[in-house]
Image: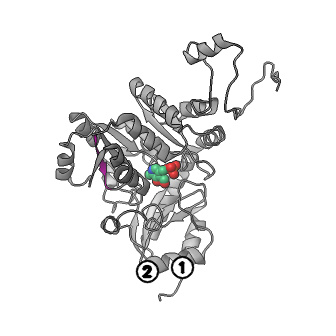
Amino acid sequence: MSEIELGPTRPLVPPLYCSAVYSFPDLDALEAVYRGQVSGFVYARDAHPNAVSLARSLASWESAKWCMVTASGMAALALTLMALLRAGDVVVASRRLYGRTLQLLTEELPRWQVHTYLVDLDDTAALAAALARRPRLVLVETLSNPTLRLADIPRLAQLCHEVGAHLLVDNTFATPVLCQPLRLGADFVVESLTKMLAGHSDVTLGAAFGREDEAWERLRRVCTIFGWTGNPFDCWLAERGLQTLAVRMQQASRTAQALADWLAQHPRIRRVIYPGRPDHPDHDLARRLFSGNYGNMLSIELAGGREAVNQFVRRQDKIVLAPSLGDVRTICTHPALTSHRYAPPEENAREGITDGLLRISVGLEPLEELQEAFRRGLDFADA
Ligand SMILES: Cc1ncc(COP(=O)(O)O)c(C=O)c1O
């Protein structure tokens, strides 16, 4: 296809570069691109313009020196672990993590001779004992899935650095609008862009972030070899979504706070978990670490267990049941049957991930519409 002449004009919207491969005028040009002497691209699995452009925008959001865009949030996590760990290494991780992350740590990493110790971050003695094992990496979620507990990132960073460990933070639930872990002392961050960052449930992507060039080289190499780069169209969509991230998060956080306070008064709701409420166990920490917003995620426990959840989902059609989060629409998820279905039942019981627990990802609808949906969904007779 011939080059289209744009003259002095430029597209207002960034172009989408679908090409899987790039051509060269001769071998000298090819060699110069490989050597990094001139800018350019070779093969989309290594890098492509849409990933580079998205990575730049994301790095500035996370106050990171670099960002690498991957094919999913799990790919970003796998990439960071594969790049930083060696056989024989120890990882310490919070017990309160996304179910697939727990599986990666406890079921897959042992095949690479990496052992993970899971700890309750509230248990200072257990954390100290785990850190005494000299881990290479400590992994926590800023805001844990689905019980929304906070990690005290500045304190953890200090403890990690005292024993020579890196602190890796999954910032998916908080997003950089609420919290930028690298500013608080974390060494690496991962995000699922599939959620709030892209924001419309039409993208599957992730990103890894850091602040040292040395680690960047290592991650770039592993990402290319394992083939984890995100695809151009998803990167293009995510960059578009990112432009409204701040307004979406601010609006959804305001609605989530009002909704959480309103739901706390409802007789069919046993428990409301929202970091912006004074009854949340980490409310003071959230006030300290977050930007003044407490996020769009809240969890509720329905008094009637699984049947009450079924009734709620069947009786109204505004808040759909879908195992994800971060959409412009409000969606609900049943963690016991989805994100945490593979976790040991006793662990779920310990964390309060019961049959009645519903995780709500608040979207951009007016508060009154959501209240009406809850009124309808919870208006049923007890069995
Ligand atoms: C906290 C958290 N981290 C990571 C992931 C994985 O992201 P992805 O689905 O983009 O692989 C999820 C997915 O739900 C998540 O909730």
For numbered disc 2, what is the local secondary structure?
loop
For numbered disc 1, what is the local secondary structure?
helix
Q: Residue 149 at x, y = what percent?
A: 35, 56
Asked if the stretch drawn in magenta spans residue 43, the answer is: no
Any mark on residue 311, and which? 1
Quadrant in the picture for residue 97: bottom left
Any mark on residue 304, and which? 2
Q: Residue 308 at x, y = what percent?
A: 48, 79
**Residue drawn where x is 34% and y is 60% of the image:** 280
Q: Residue 232 at x, y = what percent?
A: 64, 37
10 Å neighbourhood of mark 1: few (<14), some, or many (≥20)?
some
**For disc 2, does the CB lie below 8 Å from ligand 1?**
no
**Residue drawn where x is 42% and y is 47% of the image:** 292
Q: Identify whether 58 is placed above or below 117.
A: above
Q: Which residues are magenta?
A: 89-95
Q: Are marks 1 and 2 in contact (CB under 8 Å)?
A: yes
Q: Identify whether 277 is placed above or below 293.
A: below
